Amino acid sequence: MRKRTIGTDPRTRREVSVLSLGAMLFGTLTDEATSFAVLDRYVEAGGTFIDTSNNYAYWQDGSQGGTSEEVLGRWRASRGITDEVVIATKLGARPKAPGTGFIENGEGLSAEVIRASSEASRKRLGVEKLDLLYAHIEDTAVPLAETVHAFGELVNGGTVGLLGVSNHWSWRVERARHIAAQAGLPGYEVLQYGHTYLRRRGDRPGLLSQDGDQAAVQGDLIAYLKESPELTLVAYSPLLGGAYVRDDKPLGPSFDHAGTPARLAALDAVARETGATRNQVVLAWLLGGELPVIPLVGASSVAQLEESLGALELELTGEQRDLLDRAR
């Protein structure tokens, strides 16, 4: 599998596979034996970039989360996995108590939480250092400087490698990076957002804000990333939970606009021409675009993973990419 480098500091940057594997439902909806089989096949195919969070998947088992991290920790130990696989995790959206959610009762991004939750994740994963740690969601109740300093101190202390941020307004990402630079601290280098071929409406409230969907890639974030090539975009939910290929998985109101049918028609045209599935064309489009993207795919079976791996062999022609890009 092809690789790319994330991070700029020679002391912390890592080489990772261009396709990342999401472990969100490992240990809950996906049993441990199947999770291990998917992980084994991913690594066998050359995959080296796995994603989880300290709150996965609390909504499935009524816990506060951590099950996915625990499964990954057991898998690492049983397979003798060390530095060859980069595991990213997140903090900030773990419920403070079982039976609650992160919206009304999330742990947040205070310095105290960052220190305690990162240590708990290290123990669940069975690692001395977290390869990549994200701020999962915004916490406007805590001064941004407090969050930035707490994350930077973890890197300087040797318990975290790279820092990332997810589901934040782009202006707050830039402000946080500025605070870190002014203080001489490591800052966010990897950005994880929802991104796919179909365009989301920018006028609809999101899960985290009534002002719009700050969890999805929009034009301002794309422009920011193009101007900041030192940053890496990791695209979660690129396949929309199966909505591209399953009639029982509706796209939802975020995609209810005139551009969606045109984009789907272009997608189908390229799929027919290449003999690939819609999912594979979406992944190939993300992988080979002007803006480098690392798609983050989930898989509840080895067969699902195989379909995503097949996208790595799909090279879109200039004409095919132009057809996909021009569809409005």
Image (cartoon, grey):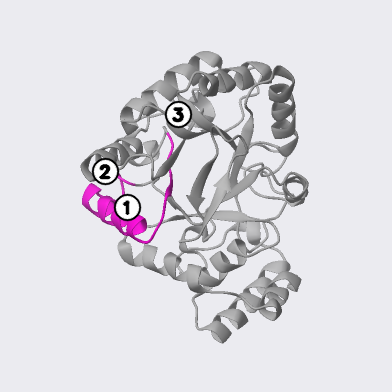
Tell me the number on the disc at residue 75.
Answer: 2
Q: Answer with mark 1 or mark 2, whichever residue precedes in sequence.
A: 1
Q: Secondary structure at mark 2?
A: helix
* Mark 2: amino acid: Trp
Q: Residue furthest top?
A: 112
Q: Which residues are magenta?
A: 26-53
Residue under circle 1? 39
Near-viewer residue (307 or 242): 307
Q: Residue furthest bottom?
A: 273
Q: Is residue 255 above or below residue 188?
A: below
Of badges 3 and 1, nearer the viewer stands 1
The answer to if 312 sits in the magenta stretch is no
Q: In the image, what residue occupies the spot 21% across and 51% down?
A: 33
* Mark 3: amino acid: Arg
Quadrant where the image shows the N terminus: bottom left
| Residue contact at pointers 1 and 2, CB within 8 angstroms | yes
